[in-house]
Amino acid sequence: VDDLDEDALWALARSGNGAAFGSVYDLHRDRVYRQARHLISSPHDAEDVTALVFLEAWRRRESVRVVDGSVIAWLLVTTNNVIRNLTRTQRRYAAAIAALPRPEPSVSHEFDQADERIDMHYQSTDVSQGWAKLSKRDQDIITLCILEDLSTADAARALGIPAGTVKSRLSRAKRKLSSLVTQTSGSRTLEGGVL
Amino acid sequence: VSSNDDFDPVRSRAIRQLLVDTADGSARPRRRPSRLLTIVAGVATAIALMTGGAAFALNAPAFLRPHTVFSGTTGPTERDLSTPQVTPPPATAEQAKANASLACQIASVQLRSAGDDEQLMGALLYAQQAAALDPKWQSLATDLAALITDPTNSSTSSASADDSTSQGEDLSARCAPFTR
């Protein structure tokens, strides 16, 4: 399993090889987790989302789209979907998630990071609120093309749309997100004078 | 992502193991399904006779009414099985056995009827709670997890004829302690 490329690894995993599926998890865990952390404030919730994404990958293994020999694009789009449908997805895997060990509290570490978090809070809140108002289509385009820096061609294959459509949607999505962030920060300034 | 956001290594290992077990558990050989209902019905009947619950054998939905489940912290409590809940694990081997028995009953009902993923997840939860206290129930939990996670294994999906029999045999074997 260690010597296989991802394409072969996924094929083996799909056939019911647990070690291969574990290796796919090793390959992409961090990127899925990072994407979840972009959208969810709690690191522990993001860990649960990561687990749910891979469980979904197993459940829907016959329809997972492999792009350029990798399943990462599918996993990232699924991360967005899982977060959007978090309650429903969690219910599906409630027993499995409940069986995972609970996170250890790390209070001192939280304090160490507090200042940095406060500084970043308002900015990330604006982006998060803007993000939440984007359509699923726009979220997926921004995830693949901007957050994950996929090429237009790869994003097009991952989403099953023409490359030209990716470009036009990306341009629209960026404009929309920018506008939403500006609106959010503007309204907060007017309401509370925070900025 | 700051260092504070690193994936908890303990949880990561647990998730990885869950995925590996899930994939491995779905890869066992399977045969025709027609025996599934027979086997599961046999298990259900045996359980009904063991527990004196003739109503179960004659009227499976009766088992979806509230039953006594061991919670470990508050002793036996009344729970509505139609809404699977996360409960603390049982505290004794007997309570673990009771939870495992309950898991078998729910699974039997669901596999005999139209089938309901949430009910099966409830069964899985009880089995996992039992396994947490007594490892001998681990295989029961694994089989139930395979039933839920792999849609081709579900009696509610269009599983191939070969899929269900081995599940029935698996469940039958796992639930055997309740039939002796």
Image (tube, coloured by chain):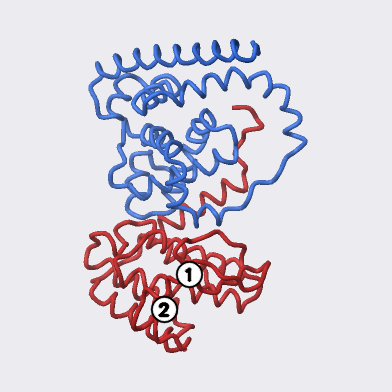
Chain holding disc 1? B
| Helix, strand or loop at mark 1 | helix
From the top left corner, tell me how far across and down residue B73 is, in percent: 68, 67
| Helix, strand or loop at mark 2 | helix
Chain holding disc 2? B
Say whether residue A160 is left or right of residue B118: left
What's the amino acid at mark 2? Ala
Determine the colour of chain B.
Answer: red
Residue that appears at 25% across and 29% down: A160
From the top left corner, tell me how far across and down residue B31 is, in percent: 26, 70
Say whether residue A15 is left or right of residue B18: left
From the top left corner, tell me how far across and down residue B65 is, in percent: 45, 71
Residue that appears at 46% across and 41% down: A86
**Residue nearest the viewer, comparing A135 with B173:** A135
Q: Which residue is mark 2?
A: B173
- On the same chain, marks 2 and 1? The answer is yes
Which quarter of the rendering shows the C terminus of chain A?
top right
Determine the colour of chain A.
Answer: blue
Q: Which residue is mark 1?
A: B139
As measured in the structure, the alpha-carbon distance from the residue carrying label 2 to the one carrying label 1 is: 10 Å
Name the image quarter holding residue A41.
Answer: top right
| Residue lying at the far front of the rendered structure | A191
Name the image quarter holding residue A113.
Answer: top right
Q: Which mark is residue B3?
A: none
Q: How many marks?
A: 2
Confirm or deny contact between disc 2 and disc 1 (CB under 8 A): yes
